[in-house]
Image: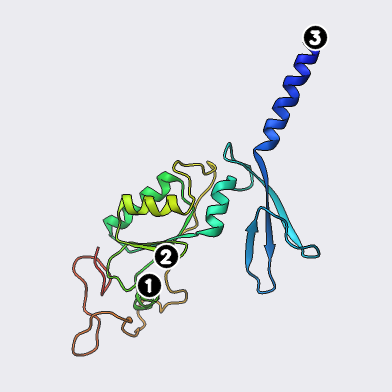
Amino acid sequence: MKVGMKFAAMFFLLMSAASVQAQLYKSTGPDGKVTYSDTPPAAGKAIAQKTVAGSGGDSSDGLPYELALAVKNHPVTLYSAEKCIPCDDGRKMLNERGIPFSEKTVKSNEDIAALHKITKGDQLPVLTVGGNQESAFSAAAWGTALTAAGYPESNRLPKTYRNAAPVAAAPGAASPGKSAAPAIGSTTNNNGDALPAAGNAPPGFRF
């Protein structure tokens, strides 16, 4: 009788452990675009497959399943500048909540022009969550946008996870010392030169 009960208990635990695991499929399309899905792609297409844990835990080689789907469907990007206290506050919030994000810095005129392609606002930081956008840091607004996009309320990142280092908003922007064209949409004087913004903000922006 005791042996039977032990066997039943062991079977239940094994089934419970299996239920929190889910398959996440990674596929590359003809255009080179990588997509993730919880269903396998059509037969005949090469796929790379890995198992990620459900909401109950992390796998050793990927993100928790719920978090991986949020990253796939609504990637997060932070646009920041140097010596920007609101940018620091926004970055801290993302890290504390465990949000995987890419960071793009705004320094050169090319960076400013790149940012103006996605926003008409003049405040930094700028946060994009999928197709949604938040200008200026607001813990409440950012939190609502992240929750609506499916990101967990608490940090579920693996302890070894690290976000990539920040990169320039405009890849290949002119190096220091080279002249650059005035940024699109920036405030200019009569000579066509970008006027410096108040404080440490890039020209045409404010914190």
Secondary structure of the residue carrying numbered label 3? loop
Total marks in image: 3
Marks 2 and 1 in Cβ contact (< 8 Å) = yes
Q: Indicate the quadrant containing the N terminus: top left, top right, bottom left or bottom right.
A: top right
Q: Is residue 10 above or below residue 63?
A: above
Closer to viewer: mark 2 or mark 1: 1
Marks 1 and 3 in Cβ contact (< 8 Å) = no
How many neighbours does mark 1 have within 10 angstroms: few (below 14), some (14-19), or many (20 or more)? many
Residue at (37%, 48%) from the top-left corner?
A: 93
Q: CA distance from mark 2 to mark 1?
A: 9 Å
Q: CA distance from mark 3 to mark 2?
A: 64 Å
Residue at (25%, 81%) from the top-left corner?
A: 194
Considering every residue shown, the one lying at the far top of the view is 1
Residue assigned mark 1: 115
Residue assigned mark 2: 104
Q: Indicate the quadrant containing the C terminus: top left, top right, bottom left or bottom right.
A: bottom left
Q: Is residue 179 above or below residue 30?
A: below
Residue at (68%, 33%) from the top-left corner?
A: 17
Q: Amino acid at mark 3?
A: Met
Q: Amino acid at mark 1?
A: Leu
> Where does the image place residue 204, in percent across and percent down from the top left?
26, 74
Q: Earlier in the sequence, mark 2 or mark 1?
A: 2
Residue 60: which numbered mark, if any?
Answer: none
The reply to whether residue 91 is in sight is: no
> Where does the image place residue 9, in percent across and percent down from the top left?
72, 20
> Where does the image place residue 120, in percent across and percent down from the top left?
32, 74
Residue 1: which numbered mark, if any?
Answer: 3
Q: Amino acid at mark 2?
A: Lys
